[in-house]
Image (spheres, grey):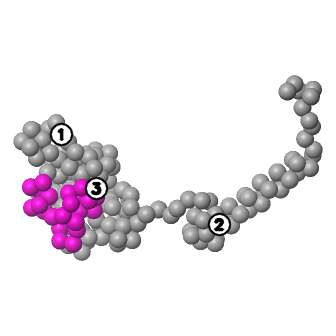
Amino acid sequence: MSAAVQPRRARANRLVRLIAAAATGAAVLAMPLVGAASASAATGTTPAATTLAGYPNNLDGWIRESLAIMAQKGIPGSYNGIHRNIIRESSGNPNAINLWDSNAAKGIPSKGLLQVIDPTFNAYHVAGTSFNIYDPVANITAACNYAAHRYGSIDNVHGAY
């Protein structure tokens, strides 16, 4: 349709859109006051999944849950030390597996967030965590337990270990 033939929109439509936008903005501003469940329902998104222990089911939650277990078991380590090593070892992928290094050549590839091999995971597994090496919390906690025995803390690890 050419510009000359197109129907003109009434000013009222613009005013209605402006009022609707303002009302939507007010609703968005009010949502945090209503609560997370209401905000999720109003925006059409689902709340973030959590672990059985109630931590967010993401890298931050896995580290915090591991730190809580480590504190109970007397295993040293800090959020920053764990995070730094995870990013270097697996980029935060709990299903990471190294199929090319010397461990892999021996048939025991490094696995999980902190790239632990099966014998190390089994030797330093922490009671109360999963026996699955790919479980993020179990992997972090076992690796930190190993690092504590070998280096004093995961905080002292600044390269492959």
Q: Is residue 64 left or right of 39 when viewed as pictured?
A: left
Give the farthest residue toward the front: 1
- Can you see residue 140? no
In this picture, residue 23 sits left or right of residue 141: right
Relative to 63, say whether 86 is above or below: above
Stretch in magenta: 118-140
Tag nearer the camera, 3 or 2: 2
Q: Earlier in the sequence, mark 1 or mark 3?
A: 3
Q: Secondary structure at mark 2?
A: helix
Q: Is residue 90 above or below residue 64?
A: above
Q: Give the left or right position of residue 131, taking residue 18 as reference.
A: left
Between residues 148 and 112, which one lies in front from this camera angle?
A: 112
Q: Residue at x 18, y 39 (%)?
A: 99
Q: Residue at x 68, y 63 (%)?
A: 29
Residue type, numbered disc 2? Met
At label 1, counting other C-alpha atoms closer than 10 Å, the crowd grade (few under 14, some 14-19, many 20 or more) is some
User: For the residues marked 2 and 1, what is the alpha-carbon distance in whole angstroms?
Assistant: 47 Å
Q: What kind of residue is marked 3?
A: Ile
- Considering the image in quadrants, where does the N terminus appear? top right
Q: Disc 1 designates what residue?
A: 99
Q: Which mark is residue 148?
A: none
Distance of label 3 from label 2 (alpha carbons): 35 Å
Q: Quadrant of residue 160?
A: top left
Query: Pointer 3: what residue?
Result: 82
